Image (cartoon, rainbow, N blue to C red):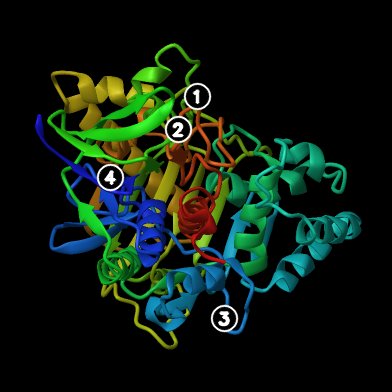
């Protein structure tokens, strides 16, 4: 073992929640060390380069869009806590998005009145119930750490009786943030409803790199330390209390507090004292994505929507498919189609992203085979299906594909280490961040705040609650 060093707090993972937690702790002069297994930060929301082109991973759009004057909203609260000026994010709002089902479509923008009018036109008998649901959501304290788990569809159906409208409302909220199949906890539902329907979508110029670079710079400025290629192979405890971590099987870091963003099941997996405990459930939801770079931008191909939530069934099946991927539903994102009034569309070519719910086990079986031919063939079938979905969404097929990239759940597992390539974590959330070990706390997706903004707020909230405590007012 290498020589032991000592810090006040270790943060596991340099994703959005881990970086935000590290920044907050370093601001208050804690000796904080952020450990990241990989060579790049961002976690589930990161970036890479292929074919001399830069791509975002995870980020379709940043939720919780507000203007600088909307004080008290999550995004501006976040900026205040991190002391990063709003303008540095260089946000461009969405044009509009569509929820596209076989018989009806609902349009929504960053102004809730558009969705209200769409529901009034398409489901006039449900508009009063939707308005009542809206008021209930506005008055609900979704971030109360003591909220009990109540399934959202049960609550929503007390306001809305039409099953089709219920399915359409849930479609974007589920695929952008639910660890549960076909439903979600009501607190999570409210978080997602407010962030998507009441606040809305935007994109930072430069994509997710802009966010990560801002966080990395701030962490450095306030004196936090970040180490890459540093896998936490063991969380060390004694008498029910944290005493340190082991890195890469050969180095010990002493600490009395740990904030882990690696996921609840993944965290339990490296704590020896948890061997005899029931481990949290591993999430079932993973995804595959086809990214097409084209010679024409989406507007030239007949579509000016920013995101289309596509579903070709009366019911939206948000569940692990029995096949490699769900052919009948997808999120279709057009990064070129934001309102680039003040900032630039940094993609010189057309970019079309098609994301499908996928089955990790089936993809992993193909990937694990000695002969990878079938794995590659199925990726091509996935891409062909994506092109069909694009056509169904109104894209004129008169385009040339200049470059394409396809990833599967095995790719997600490889670069995040999340069990089974799960994206939204376990259904067993630790809302207050606590674990059976004193000094070990959970932040990020498995604490329960979702999305990029939610993840950063989770890191800050858990740092404030469990580590800083009386250090500030």
Q: Are marks 3 and 1 in contact (CB under 8 Å)?
A: no
Determine which of the numbered discs, if any, sits on residue 132 in the image.
Answer: none
Give the Cα distance between marks 4 and 1: 30 Å
**SS at circle 3:** loop
Which numbered tag is attached to residue 406?
4
| Of the two numbered discs 3 and 4 in the rendering, the one whose residue sits closer to the viewer | 3
| Residue highlighted by disc 1 | 280
Q: Earlier in the sequence, mark 3 or mark 4?
A: 3
Marks 3 and 2, how far apart in space?
A: 34 Å
Q: Is residue 65 left or right of residue 60?
A: right
User: Which residue position holds label 2?
Assistant: 264
Query: Can you say which quadrant of the picture contains the N terminus?
Result: top left
Determine whether the residue tagged by mark 1 lies in a helix, strand or loop: loop
- Give the alpha-carbon distance from disc 3 to disc 1, as whole Å: 39 Å
- For label 3, the residue is 67
Graded by Cα atoms within 10 Å as few (under 14), some (14 to 19) or many (20 or more), the crowding at tag 3 reads some
From the viewer's side, name the closer residue of 199 and 441.
441
First in sequence: mark 4 or mark 1? Answer: 1
Q: Is residue 80 above or below residue 282?
A: below
């Amino acid at each position: 073992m290498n020589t032991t060093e000592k810090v006040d707090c270790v943060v596991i993972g340099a994703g959005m929640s881990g970086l935000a937690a590290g920044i907050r702790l370093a601001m208050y002069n804690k000796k904080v060390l952020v450990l990241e297994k990989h060579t790049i930060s961002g976690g589930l929301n990161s970036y890479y380069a292929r074919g001399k082109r830069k791509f975002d991973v995870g980020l379709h759009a940043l939720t919780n869009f507000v203007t600088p004057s909307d004080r008290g909203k999550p995004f501006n609260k976040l900026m205040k806590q991190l002391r990063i000026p709003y303008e540095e994010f260089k946000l461009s709002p969405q044009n509009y998005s569509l929820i596209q089902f076989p018989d009806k479509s609902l349009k929504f923008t960053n102004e809730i009145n558009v969705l209200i009018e769409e529901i009034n036109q398409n489901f006039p008998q449900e508009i009063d119930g939707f308005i009542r649901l809206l008021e209930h959501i506005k008055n609900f304290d979704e971030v109360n750490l003591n909220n009990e788990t109540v399934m959202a569809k049960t609550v929503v159906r007390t306001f809305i009786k039409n099953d089709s409208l219920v399915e359409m409302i849930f479609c974007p909220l589920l695929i952008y943030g639910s660890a549960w199949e076909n439903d979600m906890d009501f607190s999570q539902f409210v978080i997602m409803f407010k962030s998507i329907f009441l606040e809305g979508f935007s994109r930072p110029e430069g994509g997710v790199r802009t966010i990560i670079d801002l966080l990395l710079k701030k962490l450095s400025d306030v004196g936090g330390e970040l180490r890459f290629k540093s896998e936490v192979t063991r969380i060390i405890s004694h008498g029910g209390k944290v005493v340190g971590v082991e890195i890469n099987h050969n180095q010990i870091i002493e600490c009395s507090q740990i904030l882990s963003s690696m996921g609840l099941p993944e965290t339990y997996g490296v704590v020896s004292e948890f061997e005899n405990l029931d481990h949290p459930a591993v999430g079932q939801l993973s995804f595959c994505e086809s990214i097409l770079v084209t010679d024409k931008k989406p507007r030239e191909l007949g579509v000016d929507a920013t995101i289309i939530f596509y579903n070709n069934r009366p019911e939206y099946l948000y569940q692990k498919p029995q096949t490699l991927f769900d052919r009948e539903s997808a999120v279709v994102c057009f990064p070129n189609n934001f309102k680039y009034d003040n900032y630039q569309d940094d993609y010189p070519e057309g970019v079309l992203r098609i994301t499908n719910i996928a089955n990790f086990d089936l993809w992993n079986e193909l990937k694990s085979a000695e002969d990878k031919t079938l794995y590659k063939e199925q990726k091509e079938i996935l891409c062909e299906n994506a092109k069909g979905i694009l056509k169904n969404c109104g894209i004129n097929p008169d385009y040339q594909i200049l470059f394409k990239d396809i990833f599967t759940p095995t790719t997600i597992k490889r670069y995040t280490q999340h069990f089974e390539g799960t994206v939204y974590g376990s259904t067993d959330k630790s809302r207050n961040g606590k674990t059976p070990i004193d000094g070990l706390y959970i932040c990020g997706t498995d604490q329960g705040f979702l999305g990029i903004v939610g993840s950063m707020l989770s890191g800050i909230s858990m740092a404030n609650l469990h580590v800083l405590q009386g250090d500030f007012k």
